[in-house]
Image (cartoon, rainbow, N blue to C red):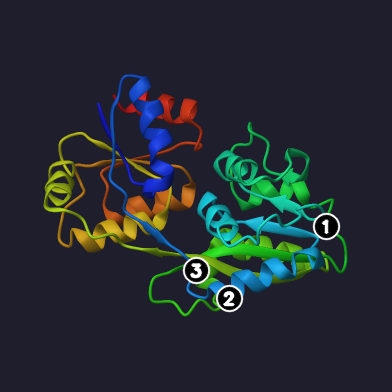
């Protein structure tokens, strides 16, 4: 069975390798491209103020990687907690040099690995007056400002609201830009074939679906199959017209079980 992994190139490799190891014809077709921050000075300023924050929340592994790309040399990371929503972001923090006992993430057995599950883990820590920095991305063409609820994303907006209810002071910094990639002729041809040949499209972002629809305007997806790693992404796939949509936790064993159920 062919499986198309639509994650950004920097995150797709491990999933592709693991799926291939399980005997699947997995390949990467990134539908989101990641670039550095629109305002690098804002990220550098956040680093200089790191000691002022009680916690930093990273929305994705991309947020970790792009934020730490501007880390001052030999900067001391002791002090704040580091909040992430899943194992990919946690691994990115570990690779960046954050101690494991400073990291908070949802339990690996949680039904969903998202902002809501993260809140269940950290809510008892948060105190009145805590300062929390949420490190996020923005879509291409955005101004990089921190005031747009839509740009923050549904989960991050919800998480920020819970923090505020606890009396925390929340700030945002944009560490990267998401944009639609320019697909090659071969990639566009694959896209058209995979719309109806039984390929499983693996989505871990609603924005990937938005970009796919834009790249293949007028393409029918009624004969296509999608596997989504969150209910909100699954809903986006249904709205895009995918004929069969399944949901799975974003852990490889769960993905494999879901893919097998589509066979």
Relative placement, left or right, of 213 versus 220 is: right
- Which residue occupies the foreground of this view, 55 or 93? 93
- Expressed as whole percent of the image width and height from the top left, the position of residue 123 reads 79, 52
Residue at 66 percent across and 73 percent down: it is 45
Task: Report if the CB atoms under discs 2 and 1 are less than 8 Å apart.
Answer: no
- Expressed as whole percent of the image width and height from the top left, the position of residue 219 reads 15, 55
Quarter that holds the N terminus:
top left
- Expressed as whole percent of the image width and height from the top left, the position of residue 69 reads 55, 58
Relative placement, left or right, of 193 versus 9 is: left
Tag in front: 2 or 1: 2
Residue at 66 percent across and 58 percent down: it is 73
Residue at 65 percent across and 51 percent down: it is 116
Q: Residues within 10 Å of mark 3 (few under 14, many from 20)?
A: many
In the drawing, what numbered circle is on residue 37? Answer: 3
In the drawing, what numbered circle is on residue 41? Answer: 2
- Expressed as whole percent of the image width and height from the top left, the position of residue 210 reads 32, 60
């Amino acid at each position: 069975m062919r499986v198309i992994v639509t994650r950004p190139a920097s995150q797709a490799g491990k999933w592709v390798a693991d799926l291939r190891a399980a005997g699947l014809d997995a390949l990467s077709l990134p539908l989101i491209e990641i670039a550095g921050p629109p305002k690098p000075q804002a990220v550098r300023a956040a680093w200089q103020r790191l000691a002022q924050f009680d916690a930093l929340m990273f929305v994705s592994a991309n947020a970790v990687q792009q934020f730490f790309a501007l880390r001052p040399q030999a900067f001391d990371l002791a002090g704040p907690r580091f909040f992430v929503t899943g194992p990919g972001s946690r691994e990115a923090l570990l690779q960046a040099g954050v101690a494991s006992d400073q990291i908070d993430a949802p339990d690996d057995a949680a039904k969903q690995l998202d902002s809501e599950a993260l809140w269940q883990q950290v809510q008892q820590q948060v105190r009145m007056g805590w300062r929390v920095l949420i490190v996020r991305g923005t879509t291409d063409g955005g101004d990089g400002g921190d005031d747009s609820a839509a740009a923050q994303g549904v989960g991050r907006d919800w998480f920020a609201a819970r923090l505020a209810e606890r009396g925390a002071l929340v700030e945002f910094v944009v560490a990267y830009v998401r944009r639609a990639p320019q697909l090659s002729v071969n990639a566009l041809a694959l896209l058209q074939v995979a719309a109806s040949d039984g390929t499983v499209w693996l989505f871990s972002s609603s924005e990937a679906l938005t970009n796919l629809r834009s790249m293949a305007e007028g393409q029918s997806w009624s004969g296509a199959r999608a596997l989504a790693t969150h209910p909100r992404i699954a809903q986006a796939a249904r709205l895009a017209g995918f004929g069969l949509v399944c949901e799975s936790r974003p852990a490889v064993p769960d993905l494999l079980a879901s893919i097998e159920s589509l066979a």
